Image: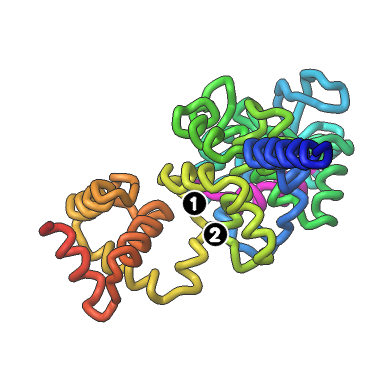
Amino acid sequence: MKIDILKKLLLVCTFIFIFFDSANAAPPYGGTIFHFPEAINSKDPSTFLEIKYEGQRQREMFDRRRNNWIKNSAYIFNAIFSDGSNIEIQVNSEFSNKENALGFAAKYSKVIGQLPEILRKDVRTVWIHKGNNLFGGGNFNLLIHTDKGDEYISEGILEETLIHEASHTSLDWSGISKTHGISKGWIEAQKADKGYISDYAEDYPNREDIAESFLPWVVVRYKADRISKKHLNKIVKAIPNRLKYFDLQGFDMRPLKLVEEKQDSKTSQIRSAFSSFSLIDRKRIQGKLSEYGYEALLDGIWGPGTLSAVRRYLSRNEIESSTGFELVFKTLLED
Ligand SMILES: [Zn+2]
């Protein structure tokens, strides 16, 4: 009898454990920047075009070595990118001469040009100091300490760290562009995912969740051929709703290319069929897909959300490509 009660108790405990486990799964990573060194590497294309020296000017910059704002007669450079954006690079006068400062300004501009366009959106300035201190994002700015930068370079995670920091600046800065972290869609995705991608995101959900989750999304959607299946599965399992949230934003991700576009001829056929329609018809196609439960942005632009909607529509309706995807879209329009 006693044993029976014990067994029942044990069973109850097990259920409670399972319940808590699924209610809030442990994050798969401590911090996401350390795990995908190949997301962007030094050989990947950059939109950085040229850099111009503008002279030494007085600027207010944040310096983590003092954990405070400083006034500095910084070397000023104007970095120009092929998408039309330009960024003022402010290099601390401690770098002694403009040639030395130019070396660092150009080196970091190239990497900033490798980030997707959406992440440069609100980056107006870059601060470059010496020191082995953490980078930073926000303030319409990216904060760089070059000794720490050298460390990131040797670990192969400079680009990934800047993806994280630029996510703060352009997607989640509480001053101006905090549109995503507090949006209804994001909060619903957080709830639906029942957990976080990293301990860091879990510890600072309001500040770090977007920045910690954006890099894994980039990896899954654009660089899946560069990570192991194990990593891929971990991410997709931990934050499927956050991934979908990013899918639906219609971000300008140039110069990155969707993994499917590189690898899969079916996807490029679907894409070119979609692109053969007028903007109005492309919007209507997306509208029809959404109407049938395959959610897509209604902007007429090809992106991961539309791709995913079309793929799900095709597979659930068991439509083969033999008829040609243009005909599939035409039929959809006529429905
Ligand atoms: Zn952060």
Please name the amino acid that badge 1 sits on. Answer: Met
Residue 52 in magenta stretch: no
The segment highlighted magenta reads: 101-117
Instruction: Identify the residue at image location x=78%, y=23%.
Output: 72
- The percent coordinates of residue 288 (x first, y second) are 22, 51
Task: Name the mark on residue 300.
Answer: none
Instruction: Identify the residue at image location x=62%, y=43%.
Output: 213
Please name the amino acid that badge 2 sits on. Answer: Tyr
Q: What crowding class fits label 1: few (fewer than 14 Cα within 10 Å), some (14-19), or many (20 or more)?
A: some
Quick check: 276 above or below 263? above
Confirm or deny contact between disc 1 and disc 2 (CB under 8 A): yes
Instruction: Identify the residue at image location x=45%, y=68%.
Output: 261
Comparing 299 with 57, the one in front is 299
The residue that mark 2 highlights is 222
Using the rendered image of the protein, determine whether residue 267 is visible from the camera's viewpoint.
yes
Instruction: Identify the residue at image location x=80%, y=18%.
Output: 68
Q: CA distance from mark 1 to mark 2?
A: 9 Å
Mark 1 or 2, which is nearer the eye? 2
Quadrant assignment for the N terminus: top right
Quick check: 268 above or below 121? below
Colour scheme in use: rainbow
Hey, which quadrant is residue 22 in on the image?
A: top right
SS of the residue at dot 2? helix
For the stretch drawn in magenta, what is the main secondary structure?
helix
Residue 112 in magenta stretch: yes
Judged left or right of residue 308, residue 78 is right
